[in-house]
Image (cartoon, rainbow, N blue to C red):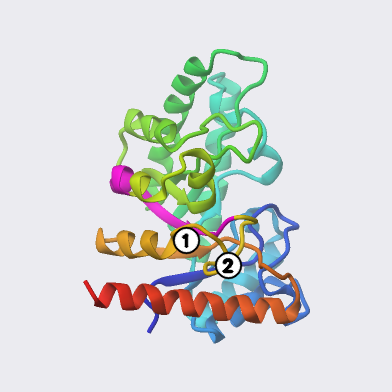
Amino acid sequence: MTALRYATHIGFAGPDDRPQFLETLGTAEPAAHVRFAAQEGMAGVLFPWVIDKSPLEREAVRRALVETGIGFSCVASLPFDVTASPIWTDRSTRNRSALAAAIVDSSNIAISLGSTLLAVVVAADAARPDTARQSDDLVANLRDVALIAQDQGLTLGIEPMVRMQSSLLRTTAAAVDVIEAVDQPNVGLIYDTTHVSMMDGDLLAVLAEHFEHIVSLQLSNEPGRVEPGAGILPLVDVAVEAVRRGYTGLVDLEHGWLRPTKSGEQAGLARVRAFDSRVRDALLSQ
């Protein structure tokens, strides 16, 4: 049994992103990657941009999930092309209706796949220099759609980042300020080790300070957003601390490989397994 409940990815950077085990399987067909994840003892898969796939592709993924019994991590709250727009900071009547309708659609997709989490990435409006007012409008919109998600048993996970140039929330603290202002039990924080290291530096300090808000843990190492065990971030310490504080959710392996080849994928998977052994040993020694 693994120390953490890992989810491999079927593409996380966009709808046409490379699946994590493309070279190993020789196909990008999502259902094949679901079955492979189960075969390798993973607890789930990460495929946020399933929202941009056809109903037939989504149904194939759903069937593979039922067949294997593994879980499904977050679904993007909005389609990829809409995510880059300032939809979250627009309080016009027309936009509020469009946002609500989009959240209903993504909620239905998430429910069909057994996911309980919608990922929220917020783009700023470049035409509005008033970031404080944009944050206020974001809070109001999140409060509205949180009620829609709550009715469906879903959580909204806000993911701050600086890697997306247009991102409004560029530190973990900024995202937490929004979460606390929304003040709804189903709005929380996606903690991504690469983003946190780029934004805030100290992974463990951020984890300790904001753990109560964390609804999803995503692991990748730096430099290069590679697998655990192939970089310099203290991911074993992060994982141990998260478990010690009570984290039991899926842990998304949201990374590429040190070497993106078939042999590199297998070597990377071995590093992940070695990483997990180190986490398990550290937990047992406490």
On the image, the x and y values in percent for residue 103 come to 53, 42
What count of labels does the image hold? 2
Q: Going by the picture, which residue comes out furthest to the front?
A: 232
Find out whether residue 137 is within the magenta segment. Answer: no
Q: Secondary structure at mark 1?
A: loop
Please determine whether, in this image, residue 84 is positioned above or below residue 260: above
Say which residue appears at 69% left-offset and 67% top-offset: 19
User: Can you tell which mark lies on residue 115?
Assistant: 1
Q: Residues within 10 Å of mark 1 (few under 14, many from 20)?
A: many
The stretch in magenta equals: 208-222
Return the residue nearer the eye: 6 or 103.
6
Q: Quadrant of residue 166?
A: top right
Q: Along the line of sight, which residue is nearer the eye, 113 or 158?
A: 158
Residue 71: % across, % down: 47, 70
Q: Residue at x 37, y 72 (%)?
A: 279
238 left or right, relative to 25: left
Q: Residue furthest right?
A: 26
For label 2, the SS is loop
Judging depth in this view, the residue of 226 and 120 nearest the camera is: 226
Question: Residue 230: which disc?
Answer: 2
Quadrant location, the C terminus: bottom left
- For marks 2 and 1, give the CA distance: 29 Å
Residue 239 against residue 32 in the figure, above or below = above
Of the pair 171 and 189, the residue shown nearer to us: 171
Of callouts 2 and 1, which one flags the residue occurring earlier in the amino acid sequence? 1
> Can residue 138 be spotted in the picture?
yes
What's under tag 2, amino acid-wise?
Ala
| Mark 2 or 1: the one toward you | 2
